[in-house]
């Protein structure tokens, strides 16, 4: 009986050259779900909300990227929806596939693939000691933020968006000094009952 061969970063490069939307998860090249409008809107809106940190050149500055591949080891190189690195730790802009562990990762769930973000990524990032992990669901309009405490994540923020005449800003680590407007992230100000997701 032939042993199952774990795929490597080199296999991922070959698949990416074929213009496939793939990532390397636990030694297996996985096709990523097609990008949906709701997913893309949440992703770009969150990037807008935290862009102040990207612009800063002082010790509070961050490199924040969307759709960035991070090489955790030879058999694990996922593409995160958003990820960030503190500039005080990574002073120069990275080049190519990122090989430095992020300080923050945010995944946006896709229907039928929730387990990857809610379980697999959470456990992996916890084991690699990534300090912050956020999960956003466009379907349920929720944001959950985890912070590493010792060897385990703990929830430091959990909110289901509720429409309000007075939008509220939330202070969520690691970007707690800036209020984040969930109504903007979920683009509900332009939503109508007939708007497709």
Image (cartoon, helix red, strand yellow):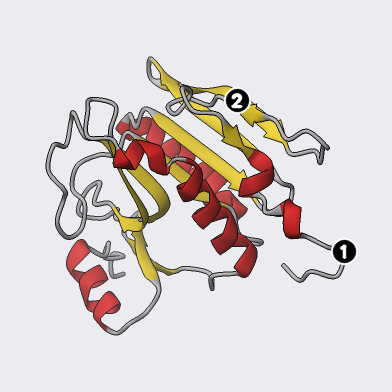
Residue, disc 1: 193
How would you rate the neighbour count of disc 1 (Cα within 10 Å): few for under 14, some for 14-19, many for 20 or more?
few
Residue, disc 2: 157
| Residue 80 x, y percent position in the rendering | 40, 53
Is 48 in front, or is 117? 48
Give me the residue at 73% from left, 35% from top: 167
Q: Quadrant of residue 175?
A: top left
Q: In which quadrant of the rendered image does the N terminus lie? A: bottom left
Give me the residue at 32% from left, 33% from top: 103
Is there CB contact under 8 Å for labels 2 and 1? no
**Dot in front, 2 or 1:** 1
How would you rate the neighbour count of disc 2 (Cα within 10 Å): few for under 14, some for 14-19, many for 20 or more?
some
Most extreme residue toward the bottom is 18
> What is the secondary structure assignment of the residue under circle 1?
loop
Is 62 in front, or is 35? 62
| Residue 122 x, y percent position in the rendering | 47, 38
Most extreme residue toward the right is 193
Q: In which quadrant of the rendered image does the C terminus lie? A: bottom right
Q: Is residue 11 left or right of residue 157?
A: left
């Amino acid at each position: 009986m032939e042993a199952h061969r774990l795929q490597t970063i080199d296999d991922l490069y070959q698949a990416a050259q074929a213009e496939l939307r793939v990532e390397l998860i636990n030694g297996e090249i996985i096709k990523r779900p097609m990008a949906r409008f709701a997913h893309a809107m949440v992703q770009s809106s969150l990037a807008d909300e935290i862009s102040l940190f990207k612009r800063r050149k002082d010790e509070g500055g961050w490199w924040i990227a969307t759709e960035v591949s991070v090489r955790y080891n030879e058999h694990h190189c996922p593409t995160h929806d958003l990820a960030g690195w503190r500039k005080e730790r990574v002073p120069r802009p990275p080049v190519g596939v990122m090989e430095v562990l992020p300080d923050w990762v945010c995944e946006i769930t896709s229907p039928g693939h929730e387990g990857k973000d809610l379980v697999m990524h959470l456990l992996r990032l916890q084991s690699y000691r990534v300090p912050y992990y956020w999960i956003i669901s466009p379907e349920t309009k929720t944001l959950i933020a985890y912070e590493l405490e010792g060897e385990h994540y703990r929830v430091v923020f959990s909110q289901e968006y509720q429409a309000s005449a007075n939008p509220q800003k939330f202070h969520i680590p690691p970007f707690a000094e800036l209020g984040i407007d969930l109504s903007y992230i979920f683009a509900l100000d332009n939503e109508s009952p007939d708007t497709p997701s």
